[in-house]
Amino acid sequence: MSAPWLIVGTVPDDGFGLVQGACVWDAGKPLEDRLVVDGIAVPVRRGTPALIAAACAACAAMDIPAPLTLLAGDAGRGHGSAAAYLRLKENLPDLRPRGLTFHYLFPDMAGHDMVLLTALELAERPVLVADAGFMYAAKMSGQAREYDLFTPDAGELAFLADELAPHPFYTRGFLLGPQADTRKLIRRAWEAGDAAKHLLVKGSSDYVVRKGEILAEIHGPRTPAMEAIGGTGDTLTGMATALLMSGREVPEACRIAAMANRLLGQLAQPTPATPVAGLIPHIAEALRLAQRS
Amino acid sequence: MKLPFGLGEKKPGPAKHKGHDAAECRGVMAFSHTSEVIRAESVLKAAGFMVRVMGPPPDMRTGCDMVVEFELMREPAARRALSAVSLAPLAVAPVRAGMLEPVSLFQSVDFGQWLMVRAANMKVTVDKKTRVIVNISGGGCPDVPALAELMVGCTLDEAPAPLDRGQTLCSYALELAFREAQRQLPHEGSPS
């Protein structure tokens, strides 16, 4: 049996504790009960549960085992994230994952550095993917290039391109406005050492990037409402994770995931008021179409 | 006679007051957690202090953090106001170089029935007719999903302000987007 892939993130409930185990996505169950982690039902509304659900649905569509997950209850104070960081330090040497996807976690630099150091000390270096809060910490630590993939949106790309900003909240205006040039931001982020080896930049157009160079641009199909829906970035990172688990190289996994996420919009025909859970049932078909494109 | 190095020249701009620049009279308070900064800002504003949140200077950064900038000369009174609600800064220092300002740019997208407002990495989408928040997206800190659970489905009047419950800089960005949405979609009869 091959080494597992571990998704690490949070649920917005301080009482949830710390749960590590296998994920199950059962499309036949009521919406609230479809995602089960280590026997516990986790509602899929946005955030890490949306990422896990998308990864599980994509794995099922590709007929590969679902990922493992480490989920911490954390409503923002950072205690759950801190517990997850400690658990990773203790468990990664035994788990020896071949890949790690980090997501909504409190961006604490000391916690980040401890986890990254542990991962880099493993005998076989895992593939490292970071999004959301952990990506913020990775950039701020100055060790972004240790990562194989970041998946920023437009606002987060501007943050990566701002060598002074420790969080997107402080991104300087000249990098944030509508006049900001995505290509220049990508280049700037890489040259400052604040981007991972690969970026999947999600937006009205998606960009697959390696070492600051754009490898692919995906412009359609366009469903503008997708930008307003909380969790559409999470489904993208979830599908990219599943494609990496299937053995695809990072650029190909990103290109297929970006196309599939766009096809989700075309298949589900959402409005800006649609919840992300309404998109996930279309993942199998979207992936099938994207892999043919 | 022209003196070298600009000596003797009159400096442009308004005449300075005797004493320090305004910036030199400002200080920053650091706290143990972003949620305390959010509370401190609220308490100090309510007590009449002119304060704002800023990014800490590089040597004080730990991750998701910010400091409260305030009038340094009023430090004792500010400490008393904070002490009354059991808050105490970890450190107080004069303002110095390297501090960053929060975002102040907003981007709006009109979807016809819905309006989406973005501040930094946070987006809030509102039904223009009913003023109900229909979606919240973006962000990366763990309180964003918690805030979204509380706010989605509420009108702009009913929804809790993100800073009332939030803990992180993402909640602060969401607060800015929320306030901008309220400004752009005022309640009928309220001044715009």
Image: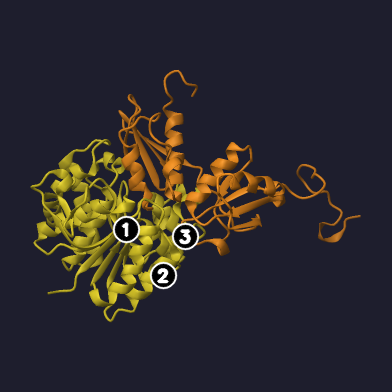
Chain colours: A yellow, B orange
- Residue A210 visible: no
Residue A189 or B64: which is nearer the viewer? B64
Residue A125 appears at what percent x and percent y? 29, 76
Write down the residue under mark 2: A113
A125 relative to B29 in the view: left or right: left
Q: What crowding class fits label 3: few (fewer than 14 Cα within 10 Å), some (14-19), or many (20 or more)?
A: many
A28 relative to B80 in the view: left or right: left
Q: Amino acid at mark 3?
A: Gly
Residue at horizontal 38 percent and vertical 57 percent from the top? A133
Asked if residue A199 is positioned above or below residue A273 in the image, the reply reads: below
- Residue B189 visible: yes
Q: Image quarter for residue B47?
A: top right
Asked if labels 1 and 3 share a chain, the reply is: no
- How much space separates mark 3 and mark 2, taking CA atoms? 11 Å
Please, which chain is the residue tagged with disc 1 on?
A
| Element on which disc 3 rests | loop
Residue A249 or A12: which is nearer the viewer? A12
In the picture, the quarter occupied by the N terminus of chain B is: bottom right
Asked if labels 3 and 2 share a chain, the reply is: no
Q: Amino acid at mark 2?
A: Asp
- How much space separates mark 1 and mark 3, taking CA atoms? 15 Å
Residue A103 is tagged as: 1
Residue A42 is tagged as: none
Please, which chain is the residue tagged with disc 3 on?
B
Query: Is label 2 in contact with label 1 (beta carbons under 8 Å)?
Result: no
Residue B63 is tagged as: 3
Asked if residue A9 is positioned above or below residue A96 in the image, the reply reads: above
Residue B29 or A236: which is nearer the viewer? B29
Residue at horizontal 33 percent and vertical 64 percent from the top? A84
